[in-house]
Amino acid sequence: MKQPPQLYYYRCKNRTLTIRQKFQINYLKWISPQYKYFLHELKPKESIEKEDATLIVFVDNIEIVELFDLYKEEWNKWAEKQKVYDLTRQLYKDLFSLREELKANPETREFVVGNGEMSVGSNRKHPIITKKVSIEFDMASNSLQILDNDTDTLFYNELLLNVEDISADSLKTYRDILANNPFHPLSEQDAKNFLSQFAFKLSSDTIFVDNPCKQDTGNYRITIKQNPAFFLRKKIDGTLQFIKKIIEDINNGGNLMPSLPPHTWRT
């Protein structure tokens, strides 16, 4: 197909401007004002009115149609990049906000990465696997860094402690599996294997979803999504962790610790 003269001009006369830029300069009147907003689909106007009041119909102008198609191809590539930039900027804002909150409450808050978003009915959601990490701000590069700490990856199952008709053995089994073979919550394949197997063993009314954007997951009572997340949580000191461990052991059929002999007390 013979190329329009204008297109030849774009490619040969001035290589410093892209087709998108040239189109914006010469044919911007054909584009809706919202074209700069990359979340909208780019569409041309059906027609425009010239100074002499005559009407030009878009589909009747072959040159403009062909140029618009080329322009749209470049525009779509630009729009996809803008979507990534926009998500990156939003992630940066969210992480920076969490960092500021952490700085304001260093004694009571800690920064955590988690995976395996679990929801039980309409109850609140919480990741199953969590790990404490650090977040630092580099002023020179204006960037945030998330760094691993020398801490264990933990199995969080508080949402399931009072849920009926689930396998209590699975809770203990997978807590032990994670303790003996720890992996990072951001390890995609390790997390997927662990979460999918746990969901299958937990109950017949549980579904594992590896697409965090999927909304319709059916009528399952328990949903477990592979969905990495960063968040702040209240610090849990060693005493409280010890008490929680005893309660979990009792719930799983363990025995109470023997009481101390009378002569060990001092008054």
Image (tube, helix red, strand yellow):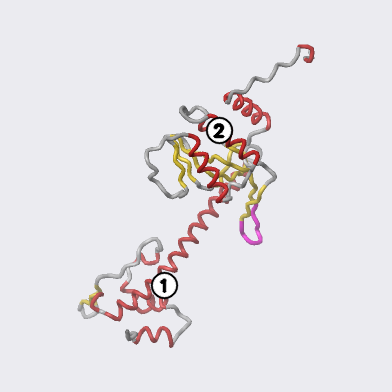
Question: What residue would you read off at disc 2?
Answer: 171
Query: The magenta stretch spans which residues?
Result: 136-143
Q: Where residue 124 sits in the image (x, y, percent)? A: 47, 36
Question: Which of the pair 258/95 is nearer the observer?
Answer: 258
Amino acid type at mark 1: Glu
Residue 78's spot in the image, x, y percent?
Answer: 44, 68
Residue type beneath disc 2: Leu
Above or below 63: residue 149: above
Q: How many numbered discs, if any? A: 2
| Image quarter (top left, top right, bottom left or bottom right) of the N terminus | bottom left
Q: Residues within 10 Å of mark 1 (few under 14, many from 20)?
A: some
Residue closest to the eye, 169 or 183: 169
Q: Secondary structure at mark 2?
A: helix
Where is residue 66, by image quadrant? bottom left
Position of 251 with respect to 29 (left or right) is right
Q: Nearer the viewer, residue 96 or 64?
A: 64
Q: Is residue 78 magenta?
A: no
Q: Kindly identify which numbered label has been placed on residue 74.
A: 1
- SS for callout 1: helix
Kindly check if marks 1 and 2 are in contact, taking CB atoms under 8 A apart as contact.
no
Residue drawn at x 40%, y 70% as measured from the top left: 75
* Percent coordinates x, y for residue 48 in the rendering: 25, 74
| Residue 120 image point, x, y percent | 45, 35
Q: Nearer the viewer, mark 1 or mark 2?
A: 2
Q: Is residue 141 magenta?
A: yes
